[in-house]
Amino acid sequence: MKQLRTFMVQKKQTKTTRGTGAREAAAQATRDSILKAATKVFARYGYDGGSIEKISSTAKTHDRMIYYYFGSKEGLFIAVLEGIYQRMDEAEATCAPDLADPVAALLAVIRFKVDYYRRHPEFVTLLNTENLHKGKHVSKSAKAVEFSSHAVELIREILEAGAARGLFRTDLRPRDLYLLIVSTAYFFTSNRYTLSAFLGETLDSREATDAWEHFVSDCVLRVVRAEPAAARR
């Protein structure tokens, strides 16, 4: 009898655990669906035009679910910004440049940045939107600094590896080099349509992006390379 009661208790616990797991999975799926829809809507309509109604309709859910998971429209927008930063951070981590070859490592970072912005125009659009709001939403995120610190730290490691081999200058700030790389990649993508019209040539192509990447790489290497001893005297 005792064994039967034990078996029934274990069976009930197993059923409860499975039920809880299913509910958690469903909740996460709903949350992910809302985030995906919000990313599309905010990228298309901006923060002001990206209404809760449009997002819930795109996600095929109800307005109340957005408030339940994110608290407010601003809370949802912050989560979207955190999401796009996290995805870029994770993608960059897979790049894993080899510090044994600092020059190749630096070129890999440049290649990643230029290519990532081109393949993820929604990233650029959402950052443009947030800059119009003077960064007031992302400044409330505790994760934003964490993501940027990873990228700057990688640049620092590359610079130190290159300096240790006498290849790179020792007076460069990792933050400055990071800003130089991302600004060239970001500007090219964010202004590619107006620049195409202004310059009279198509910049929104793989060939144009590759040419820009090579140019940026050459510029950055000229900045970081250590001067020959004779030139410093």
Image (cartoon, rainbow, N blue to C red):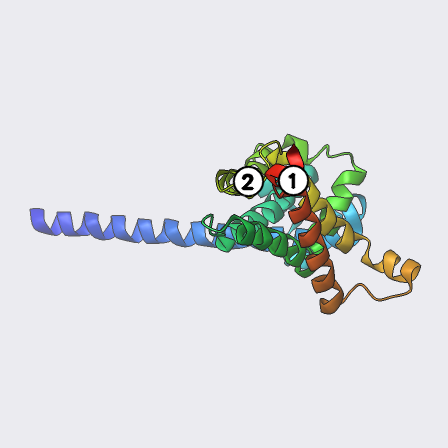
Q: Is residue 2 left or right of residue 200?
A: left
Q: Is residue 28 above or below residue 168?
A: below
Q: Is residue 70 visible in the rendered structure shown here?
A: yes
Report x, y in % for residue 73: 69, 41
- For the image, the number of numbered tags is 2
Q: CA distance from mark 1 to mark 2?
A: 9 Å
Q: Is residue 54 visible?
A: no
- Nearer to the camera, 209 or 3: 209
Give the numbered dot on residue 99.
none
User: Which residue is disc 1 drawn over?
Assistant: 177
Residue 67 is drawn in which quadrant? top right
Task: Answer with left or right where residue 20 lies relative to residue 148.
Answer: left
Q: Image height check: is 164 above or below 87? A: above
Q: Amino acid at mark 1?
A: Leu
Of 172 and 86, the residue lying toward us: 172
- Does the residue at mark 1 contact the one at mark 2 (Cβ under 8 Å)? yes
Please report the residue visible at 33 percent of the width from the left and 53 percent of the height from the top. Answer: 18
User: Where does the image place residue 186, in percent across and percent down from the top left?
Assistant: 73, 49
Q: Earlier in the sequence, mark 1 or mark 2?
A: 2
Whole-percent x, y for residue 91 in the image:
54, 53
As shown in the figure, which amino acid type bears the numbered disc 2? Answer: Leu
Question: In this figure, which residue is indicated by the disc labeled 2?
Answer: 159
Depth check, front residue: 119 or 217: 217
SS class, disc 2: helix
From the top left corner, tell me how far across and down residue 137 is, in percent: 70, 35
